[in-house]
Amino acid sequence: MQAFSQLLDSLILTPGRNAKITLLCDYFARTPDPARGWALAAITGELDLKTIKPAMIRALVSERMDEELFRLSYDYVGDLAETVSLVWPETHGANYSPTLDEIVDTVQDTPKAKAPELIAHWLDRLGASERWALLKLVTGGLRIGVSARLAKQALAKFGGVKAGEIEELWHGLDAPYEDLFAWLSGDGEKPTPDMSGAFRPVMLAHPLIAKKDRDDPDAINPDMITPEAFAAEWKWDGIRVQAVSENGVRHLYTRTGDDISHTFPDVVAAMEFDAVLDGELLVRKPDGNVAPFNDLQQRLNRKTVSKKMLSERPAFIRAYDILHHGEEDLRALTFRERRAKLEALLGTSPTDRFDVSPLVEVTDAASLNALRNAPPQPEIEGLMLKRWESIYEAGRPKGPWFKWKRDPFLIDAVIMYAQRGHGRRSGYFSDFTFGVWAETDEGHEITPVGKAYFGFTDDELKELDKFVRNNTIDRFGPVRMVKATREEGLVVEVAFEGLNASPRHKSGVAMRFPRFNRIRWDKPAAEAETLDGLKEFLSYSET
Amino acid sequence: MRSPDQLLHPTPAGLYCPVGDFYIDPVRAVDRAVITHGHADHARAGHGAVLATPETINIMAARYGEDFTAKRQPTELGEVVSINGVEVSLAPAGHVLGSAQAVVEHKGLRMVCTGDYKRRQDPTCTPFEPVPCHVFISEATFALPVFRHPDDREEIRKLLHSLTTFPDRAHLVGVYALGKAQRVISLIREAGYQDTIYIHGALKSLCDLYEDHGISLGSLEPATLEKGVAKEEQAKFAGKIVMGPPSAFRDKWARRFPDPITVFCSGWMRIRQRAKQSGVELPIILSDHADWDELTQTVRDVNPQELWVTHGREDALCRWAELEGYSARPLRLVGYDEDS
Ligand SMILES: [Zn+2]
Ligand SMILES: [Zn+2]
């Protein structure tokens, strides 16, 4: 456990990908199985030990210390696991430290009701740093700035193989990955898991940044978008999924490989093909058109689906790529060739569960630019541009695919509440609730319409934090209420992707993906948007 | 017994004794000051008269120049001085060289102001002594149960271990110029490391002063590097310790060292995110202030009738005192830094 917690500590504090990869390689080299495999699973998010809720951890602490002293500590540190690990009373002489595999095994064999007792027993025996690692493991919030991708790159370096080989195998392997480590250490053959029905790593697009942003190294010249080079499709506002149907095994995965088959039995039942398809999961309205994202959201949130839900919100897949057909791996073919195969499979007989995303005619960049901002349906977020000659490459390669989103909607809002952030931003007020003016009989009343916690630079974060500290008028636990009157208040320009009617919210609306666009230190609060003005955006989002 | 407020009470300039007409660690220039120790937020230049230990007087002279005050009143630990009928003496605080608690006594009422203090053994200064008193005025820099400083020697071992793990990287160790620098150097020497330690210019005069007071720091050399020097010159810092104030590591000066690894020695390093936010790669938890356990143990040792809390996280220590049955109040004095 000590080696694992030291690894996490170093990973958190070490800047730079290469240094992190080195740390991981060193750890894999000096840690035996199965501990290194469990560590890998924990870091890549494959280890689900969620045995205990944060509230139970708090209960354990309050049996051991004064609530108020704990509250002051938590408020200062900003992270529950870290606070608890630091305030936990040291038991002297109890210096037996369980190993990582012992922890994993025991947790998996312990009934949930006994979990708090077990965790407390270990907390009494571990040092502060290991207590933190343990708490992160059992509450399922191991955020240490290492992506699964980076971990796989470290594995590749450790074994001297290509990262793509690891990616490809990954979803056929299970923790603690003893066969994988045997292969990478030269003590075994390359594992050959049965990949039938397995998730294939997905190819992602870069945002298209027009070349006028000269400083941006990712910028491209829109003039290069020609019909010869690029195919264009609409970017549908659903979620990206992979539908796998092989040898009778059927799965529906999100683009990160989470299996959501149970949530969409209607789609899975219709997978009458032997192929791996890449597409957008959407809900259909009675008129046959695509329903607002909100309807899909309703279905995503359910663990079990009712008959009513299935009939009111039927899901379907609008396919845009094909990765496998029968025994044939198509990923090395060009997009042009894959598109032909996809149309051959589905195009001739689309069902109400599967159709092909139509191509948009490409003339030049200017006309596409106009189209992306005025799409024919509200449930289109913009355009996808794909090079005809691009092979299907896992990850986010630069150059072959671009997403060119509709410009966001913008409004001016006033900051109302602020809350401390987490992780890197703990200690700063970085989560903001903002509002607009509702006209009432008594005049203008500020009404909350959304929350945002990014869209500002580190320097702006410091200024915002200072503003909150200097303008606090009330506190509710971790939340600060700041001055937000017609005369005094900080205006921020908020960008968002859409607006849905929402009876759950006081304002009656819910914003999609709001973030700060810029801070208007100069703008008088009274000039911020009105609620009626904001509601005009509803018509863009819902028909 | 008279009310303690009549003997000492907080004012915007600092803790004031109206009977004796003097301040303790005033944050503005005053006629007469009692100074607990040489850190800049406690010891300012320009007072009419300064009563402090001889070491603190020397530190102030080294930092501010010989004319830092009109009248010096060096007072040994334990010596009692009468100021307008108020008996003032100094007791060791164990914080930095020359640091003292101010003991103020009048008509049977004794009040002790700790200044900054710690309870751990420190080769560079006289250890803290609890002084029984009616009112104990405690600092509270690390007064939260999350702050428990680990063993100093273990922490120093982390640094020395890193030197062997990364023999190609210069180890830039951030330390406060007064006290922390010399303590860290002493601990490194105690751990058996005898190589030259390179120091930033801001540390030189205080290291010399400690040497003059008989605290031997071993081989120290200036960590100077001209811009554009040859690679071979730079290479001499690889795998070596370079010490400086944390501010120096944020500017260009630090970039000249080969593949530097940033180390910071402070009690704040106990909090992971705090280390991360300051860009520290190797946090060394080492403080010249009392941690939570030391603060609470000290209150028990002194066992005062009243506890006054200042300089830091006052709420938590007051809350603890309340739970333990002490009457406690936060002073909310302004003008003191977080960690010096
Ligand atoms: Zn201080
Ligand atoms: Zn100090």
Image (cartoon, rainbow, N blue to C red):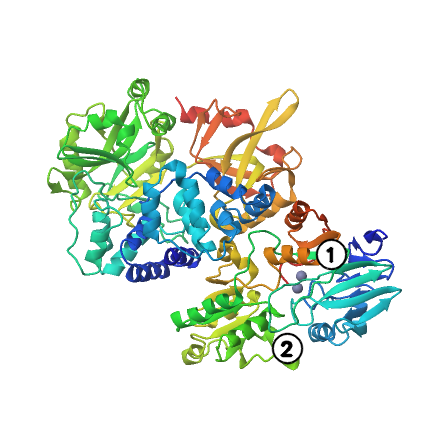
Helix, strand or loop at label 2? It is helix
Specify whether B228 is left or right of A218: right
Ligand 2 lies in quarter: bottom right
Mark number, residue B2: none
**Letter of the chain that mark 1 sits on in the rendering:** B
User: Which image quarter is the N terminus of chain A in?
Assistant: bottom left
Q: Quadrant of residue B268?
A: bottom right
Specify whether A269 is left or right of B181: left
Mark number, residue B210: 2
Q: Identify the residue shown where x is 65% and y is 66%.
A: B95
Specify whether A489 is left or right of B243: right
Residue B184 visible in the current orientation: yes
User: Which image quarter is the C terminus of chain A in?
Assistant: top left
* Location of mark 1 (residue): B136
Q: Quadrant of residue A377?
A: top left
Q: Examine the rendered structure and indicate whether residue A102 appears above or below residue A269.
A: below
First in residue order: circle 1 vs circle 2: 1
